[in-house]
DNA sequence: CTGTTAGCGCGTTCAA
DNA sequence: TTGAACGCGCTAACAG
């Protein structure tokens, strides 16, 4: 492991000149730079990350506070993490994983004080979140994936639930559907003020009302059995229903079964649109589901980019960056059979 | 950010005494230790990770070389990564993500020389893998998740495909099935010598032959359509077939559709056992699939524990640590309808 | 354009 | 049992 001193000697320059040649913080003549480069190559020199960090007081490392337990399939989490790591690398940063839940704000404070990270990415944010306060008082730049209730002064990127539900409803309405249901996450998540549950519900309702349509939505446990029951309840509430927007992957599979058991063919008689889904789940169904895929990779990339900007002293985004789920047409949505006019 | 010097002054001792009090590398009298602890608490002292690393030449950081692109649902990857991060933390290590594919051995070498990591976890290993050589010549401890063709002198943890396929076949045979198929990953993965494809095939065949049964296995692209065709091919090859072991999540969903379209009820007429599956996929089917869940979390934990041992100068496991997938009974396997004796 | 030098915060050897 | 001092490898003044 060659050091800068080794390189300096070999190139017949001083140690600092090597440093400056590397950082570009000061002009270095072409000829000496060439000699230095040569020496570095010959020695296989790589600057020591820890020494660099200690001296410059920047670790060039970003921390990702990782969800304690993942609900659901969470291929989305994989996409997110992979994308965040890639983006960090592209910007010359390492990404470290800090596996802490919402109740471990204190431990986060400890790690922050260790000076290992220049900035923090906080995912699966709750509407009320102690970790945000911990990071705030620690004075370390951080970016939220998701949003707290009050995002004033915070930098966040999140799924655009309004736009996603709006696009979902628009897709179905364009196909002629008028009686549309919404199959949401569980009552437990609603009670816990899980943001997607709340925002999804609100977004769906507004999208329907905006069109003069009556919104029907149900909360539903994350299981196929609950999905069947929820679907049955929606149909009971509005027998003329011809389409459903679901935001609950496992339950969606139960819902389709319930529909088929009632002799309703998908998509001829009934359309199913699964939103905020993980990659690949659309293909698991027959017919393959039309989905709106959660933008895991984009969130990872934008979250890191925003954080890198913050760490560099840049401005925190005044408004949250919101990204909509992308519609991926499958075989579970089709024109409404008989355009009713109720 | 209090430093050791601050603590030393406040406790009226020298800097080195604080250091020793912290590391325990040298005895410190109870009274001074108490004063030091007190001072540390009052100042909220946390040793600076970078300085510690520079001085001790150990970063207390482990690197996880992360798969470039994830095939399939890969909730398993999430489980693995979360578990690895948790285990690393329990042992006082950070976990950093290095997103590098099999063709980026050179970049890995660079990062290793930066001295950021004390050891490396390499996942999604190929049977032939340049990254292994890169790590080997770099002289850094590393652990494989998966196995290369030649594991001599390497430390690895992997799924026990032999045992998993054996257990899968045993489960079905115990239920009275005699004509059993195996729906594998794609021909492309086979050609690329993707280890699970090869080992799964071999394990299945051996488990069948061992019982005097004839193995029928097919390669199958990761899609429901291909799953249907593969299932049809298996049935064509052996019309008396009453059960199938699948190791291809997406294709499994197509296979079940093909069975049901032929009027074969699951599990009354035909049993389906999906092995090496991600968490949650079992529940996505109707009936819920009987699965053998990939031991993502165990692999993460054991991989990190082995690596920590290596980094500490411990011995590398002579033999690979193999973990079988755990059988989770669902509703897709049942006794064979008519115990045939062909 | 280049060299000299004082730290960054902590581990550890040598003396006491 | 404790202290003083050096060095880990590099950055960033300061000086020329």
Image: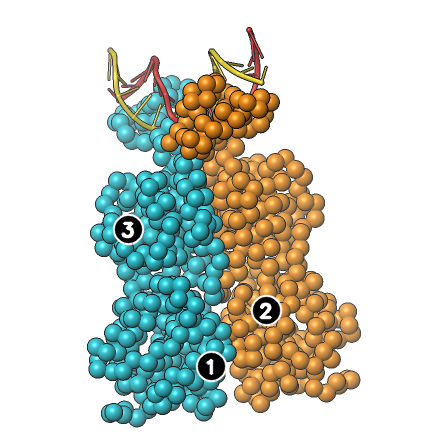
Chain colours: A cyan, B orange, C red, D yellow
Q: Which marked residue is nearer to the observer: mark 2 or mark 3?
A: 3
In the depicted structure, whether residue A301 falls above or below residue A71: above
In the depicted structure, whether residue B155 falls above or below residue B248: above
Circles 3 and 1 in contact, beta carbons < 8 Å: no
Chain hosting mark 1? A
**Secondary structure beneath disc 3?**
loop
Q: How far apart are marks 2 and 3 (CA)?
A: 42 Å
Question: In the image, residue A206 lies at what x, y percent?
Answer: 25, 74
Foreground residue among A85 and A222: A222
Badge 2 local density, few (<14 within 10 Å), some, or many (20+)? many
Q: Distance between the residues labelled 3 and 1?
A: 39 Å
Q: Which marked residue is nearer to the observer: mark 1 or mark 2?
A: 1
The quadrant where residue A283 appears:
bottom left
Measuring 58% from the left and 90% from the top, which residue is drawn there?
B263
Circle 2 sits on which residue?
B247
Circle 3 sits on which residue?
A155
Question: In the image, residue B250 lies at what x, y percent?
Answer: 51, 72
Q: Which label is found at residue A228?
A: 1
Circles 1 and 2 in contact, beta carbons < 8 Å: no
């Amino acid at each position: 492991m060659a050091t800068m001193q080794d390189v300096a000697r070999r190139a017949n320059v001083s140690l600092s000149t090597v440093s400056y040649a590397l950082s570009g913080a000061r002009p270095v003549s072409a000829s000496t730079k060439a000699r230095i480069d040569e020496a570095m190559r010959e020695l296989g020199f790589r600057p020591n990350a820890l020494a660099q960090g200690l001296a410059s007081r920047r670790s060039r490392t970003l921390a990702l506070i990782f969800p304690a337990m993942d609900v659901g399939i969470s291929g989305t989490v994989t996409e997110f993490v992979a994308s965040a790591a890639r983006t960090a690398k592209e910007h010359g940063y390492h990404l470290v994983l800090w596996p802490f839940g919402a109740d471990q704000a204190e431990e986060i404070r400890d790690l922050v004080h260790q000076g290992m990270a220049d900035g923090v990415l906080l995912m699966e944010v709750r509407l009320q979140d102690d970790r945000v306060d911990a990071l705030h008082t620690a004075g370390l730049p951080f970016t939220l994936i998701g949003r707290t209730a009050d995002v004033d002064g915070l930098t966040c990127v999140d799924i655009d639930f309004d736009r996603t539900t709006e696009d979902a409803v628009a897709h179905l309405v364009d196909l002629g559907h008028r009686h549309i249901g919404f199959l949401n996450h569980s009552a437990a998540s609603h009670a816990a003020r899980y943001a997607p549950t709340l925002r999804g519900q609100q977004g769906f309702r507004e999208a329907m009302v905006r069109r003069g349509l009556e919104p029907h939505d149900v909360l539903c446990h994350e299981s196929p059995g609950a999905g069947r029951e929820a679907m049955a309840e929606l149909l009971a509430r509005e027998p003329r229903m011809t389409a459903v927007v679901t935001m609950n992957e496992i339950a969606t599979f139960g819902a389709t079964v319930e529909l088929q058991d009632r002799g309703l063919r998908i998509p001829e008689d009934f359309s199913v649109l699964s939103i905020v889904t993980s990659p690949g789940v659309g293909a698991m169904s027959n017919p393959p589901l039309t989905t709106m895929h959660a933008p895991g990779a984009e969130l990872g990339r934008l979250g890191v980019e925003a954080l890198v900007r913050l760490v560099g002293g840049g401005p925190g985004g005044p408004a949250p960056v919101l990204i909509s789920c992308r519609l991926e047409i499958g075989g579970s949505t089709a024109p409404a059979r008989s355009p009713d006019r109720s």
